[in-house]
Image (cartoon, grey):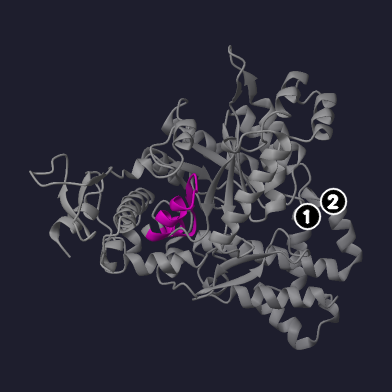
Amino acid sequence: MTELLRKAVEAPRERAWISISSTGVPEVVSVGTETQGKSATATLPPVYPEWLGDRSFAADHGARFCYVAGEMARGIATPKMVIEAARAGCVGFYGSAGLAIPEIKSGVEEIKSALGDQAKNWGANLIHSPQEPGQEKAVIDLFLGHKVSRVSVSAFMRLTAEVVRYTALGLSRSVDGAILRSNHVFAKVSRAEVAEAFMAPAPEKILKALVAEGAISAEQADLAVKVPVAADITAEADSGGHTDNRPAFTLFSSLAAARARVSLRHSIPESSIRIGLAGGIATPQSVAAAFQMGAAYVLTGSINQSTVESGLALPGRKLLANAGPADVAMAPAADMFEQGVQVQVLKRGTLFAMRGKKLHAFYRSGASYETLPVEDRKWLDDVLGEPFEAAWDATRSYIQRVNPVEAARADKDGNKRLALVARRYLFMGAQWAREGADGRAADYQIWCGPAMGAFNEWVAGSFLEPVEARTVRQIALNLMEGAARVTRAAQLRSTGIAVPAELFSYRPVAFE
């Protein structure tokens, strides 16, 4: 390997001059603006981290990089994380899902105060909440009232009126007749059939109902049938939390095909729908691969949970920093327990996944606490940390406030009572992890995908290995810089140059 070849990879912002000999073997003869008197057959243009991805994404969202620090529910993606991601030139999303309205309001106000009213490169999360009627409307009302112009929607299996309302209320026409958006929906999906609903214009049935209610104007409804509900679709591959464990490359290709179908069906340009990739984004190679296959942007999640800006307490962050790629498992989701929906969580250092699965097996068997064998009742009380009846009293008090119909049903149905108490335990697992609750480490619910382990392997021995040194900014800048170098190495290889394997690797460095 020549020093010029190494320099061509390590200085991707410089031009690389290539000569092809009479035998057809190419070599790098210069790096920079001059060929230094040597004959060059071709030149490779610079590769900037800022050029990776779809430049319209960065322009529309006021970002330097096509990089998103994704929302992690229950405030794991804190206002501080969003602020630091935005200041680093990325897009940051507040993990507002699962939080009470006053807490969401406080977080949004903190972000706006720090970034100013003109900042566009941040948003907040709306999660589908079928168990809490009215919650989605309340959250959307808050976002509209506080002019949150970017919302990432997740765990939706179908399009809802509240998402359509948010999109439609942000549509207008410019003086030259172009349709403008002031409200941007990012739809996080893992299935093509769900993606198509967000890629397509809003259904007329929903729009007519919203107009009849006075929720949107007739003009806004007319505009909404001409543009996608969401211009940014996040392909959520094998990730932490809610996931279908889809391989990233398969999922991205599937959504790209869905985009082509929607474009043809509704006569809208494919370029009006951007597809980003999440799940498995943890190393320079994975970032470069995502952009190489056409991702408009990348979104990171699990790896940010281990940073100092995370809402996860230090004990949980230390557990994450020790995880390997195989140290994850699927467990029942608190919000969709009865439906059998699962989330991916950290396995190493906790018993949460095993305990959650056992609780779901009890529910699926049709049992109530009273019909369980004595040893199972004792196990359940030990896991709950209190007698079942005490747990039910606390659970009922909450359910009675948010969903009285469900509480009344549970009063008559022991199996339903068991399900609701199990949901409370699962919910509290995440809360205990956020708080770093003493004596509850075995019950921590820490959403985590295999990418966390790959990240830990990449940063081993570097300044980013200690959990106390991990920041959203340093991770983002290193991933994007590394991706630029990997892209340059691939660029050189595509010309026929033999590029050694070590030049496809990048070690983290501390950015000022």
> Which residue in the protein does label 2 denote?
404
Q: What amino acid is found at the position of numbered circle 2 in the picture?
A: Pro
Helix or strand or loop: what does disc 2 sit on? helix
**Could you say which is closer to the camera, residue 174 or residue 114?**
174
Q: Where, quadrant-wise, is the C terminus in this rendering?
A: top left
> Which residue in the protein does label 1 denote?
399
Q: Is residue 319 above or below residue 214?
A: below
Q: Residue furthest left?
A: 37
Is 297 inside the magenta-drawn segment? yes
Q: Position of residue 191 (x, y in %)?
A: 67, 55
Pointer 2 local density, CA inside 10 Å: few below 14, some 14–19, many at least 20: some
Q: What is the magenta range? A: 285-306
For image coordinates 42% across by 39% down, the residue present is 86
Residue 73 visible somewhere in the drawing: no
Q: Is residue 304 above or below residue 167?
A: below
Q: Position of residue 53 (x, y in %)?
A: 44, 44
**Could you say which is closer to the camera, residue 24 or residue 322?**
24
Helix or strand or loop: what does disc 1 sit on? helix
Is 28 inside the magenta-drawn segment? no
* Mark nearer the N terminus (2 vs 1): 1
Q: Position of residue 487 (x, y in %)?
A: 34, 53
Pointer 1 local density, CA inside 10 Å: few below 14, some 14–19, many at least 20: many
**Could you say which is closer to the camera, residue 209 or residue 8?**
8
Q: Where, quadrant-wise, is the N terminus in this rendering?
A: bottom left
For image coordinates 65% across by 61% down, the residue present is 427
Q: Is residue 76 above or below residue 226?
A: below
Q: Position of residue 270 (x, y in %)?
A: 60, 38
Q: What amino acid is found at the position of numbered circle 1 in the picture?
A: Ile
Query: On the image, which quarter does residue 183 sit in?
Result: top right
